[in-house]
Amino acid sequence: MKDVELKEVDQEKQLMTGQTQINGCVKVTVPENAGVKYTGLSKDELIKIASTAGWVRTRWVLLVLFWFGWIGMLAGAIVIIVQAPRCKPIPEMNWWNEGPLYQISDVNAFSEKGLKVEEKLDYMNQMKVKGLVLGPIHTVQADQLDKLNLVSVKPEVGTKNDLESLLSISIVLNLTPKYENASSWFNNATAVAEKIRVSADKKEEIVKGDIMKTDSWPGYIQPKCPDQKKCIALMGSVTGLSVDEVSLVLNRSGVDLLLNGLPDLAEPGERQAQVIKNHYFSHLQMSLGWCLSGRTLGSPAVPVRLYQMLLFTLPGTPVFSAGDEIGLKAGENPKIMWDLEYPVVETNATAKTLQEEHIAVRNFFKTLTHLRGKERSLVHGEYVSLFSSPTSLAFVRLWDQSERFLTAMNWGNDPVTMNLTYRDLPTQAQVRLTTDAANLAVDSMVSLEKFQLGPKQAVLLSYPYAG
């Protein structure tokens, strides 16, 4: 208990002087704990209530509901898993199918140090390169077969130790016999093929086989490898052959990868679309490669970025030469590639425009290599032709439930309207890469109904799997 003293002031008894007269005091006693304290039920009371029939039934009902709910969710998850579409197994690939191959024909032009190009490997990694195609770098003298030595490195480019220092990345050696002459082969193709086989035996001792010939292939070795993942790749290169002739070389030669030139976009698009389709249905993707050369390929009226997009979106292994990534033309110094790594400010207007164009082409190229490296539809996907005209074509690459990629290009001088039809095409798709940023901004959504593409333009679109 505590005492509280209250003092009250009567307003009527306040003095005019401002002083206050105390009228009286009241002393009141107030209990400290005036409220009622809640103590709850005791243990014995709780046990007594919990044992009643109502609470027992309630607990059983809640327990049964819990287990029914848990079993129902488990059954639902099992049904979803069972009914869900199975993911298509990823095809087993060799290392030369896993990404683009970078071809360095003139080693000394590529690097001032010849074969000592280790410092350039980071540059190649930026483009997701999986292997190098070097040379030819072997020694040979014109029209002297006995002087052909495929296991000796030409002193002008480096030494055997320099070559071995590059083995952190997969290497393909170009063994074109007479690479310094107009004719690539000696008359005695069988003797040359024997030298190739012997040189391969000396390097790894895992390439064995028989020398074979066809009308379109002068001579080669049919390899037999115990482990395809570590096997030496036998690659061939052809130009100007029909689809049937390419099939003949692939089926009878035993080559692991046959490099073919990209379709020439200066020719009618309907024909090129049919050629691509025939190649796709006639050959395994893992055995066919496409070559790009910015110096000599196609018509100069076709922008190089259209060829670059075609290279990385067609089924097959992309192969490109040093300089193609920046659109290097004939007569331009390969040193430009390294100048672009740390570009200087150009004061000359023409030089500045050229520098900006090289940088734009390189950035476009790198984006393509990154997409090609991570998107399953571009690596393994089926090829479906959607549209073709004399100056344009469009196709889609699709793999299982992965995102689909649609390539459209127009190399003509006029805009083209494409009527795109396929069973899973949506009404809209997302722009992933484009040469026409003004009308087709990256990441924007565009309508696929009567799709319009400007002259000398290309675009890569994507859309999700819809089931």
Image (cartoon, rainbow, N blue to C red):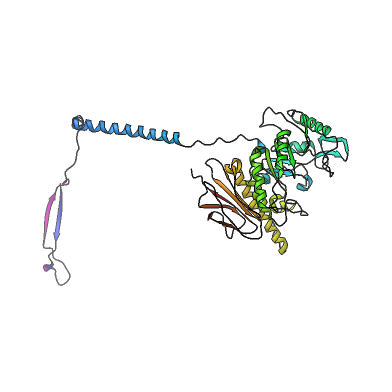
In this orientation, does residue 387 appear?
yes
Q: Residue furthest bottom?
A: 16
| Residue 23 locus on image (x, y percent) | 11, 63
Question: Which residue: 17% across, 70% down?
Answer: 18
Q: Out of 190 and 402, give the one closest to the viewer.
A: 190
Tell which of 384 and 46 is nearer to you.
384
Q: Quadrant of residue 372?
A: top right
Q: Is the stretch drawn in magenta largely helix, strand or loop?
A: loop
Could you tell me residue 62's position as x and y percent? 27, 34
- Image side of residue 182 versus residue 340, left or right: right
Whether residue 187 sits left or right of residue 450 in the image: it is right
Tell whether 313 sits left or right of 36.
right
| Number of numbered callouts drawn | 0
Query: Is there any visible trace of residue 316 in the rendered image?
Result: no
Residue 43 position, x and y percent, is: 21, 31
Q: What residue lies at 49% left-to-right and 45% top-to-bottom?
A: 466
Query: What residue is shown at x 21% (from left), y 31% (from top)?
Result: 50
Tell me residue 185's x, y (percent).
Answer: 83, 39
Q: Is residue 25 magenta?
A: yes
Find residue 398 and report its image quarter.
top right
Q: Is residue 294 magenta?
A: no
State whether residue 440 is above or below residue 39.
below
What range is drawn magenta here? 12-35
Image height of 383 relative to 89, above or below? below
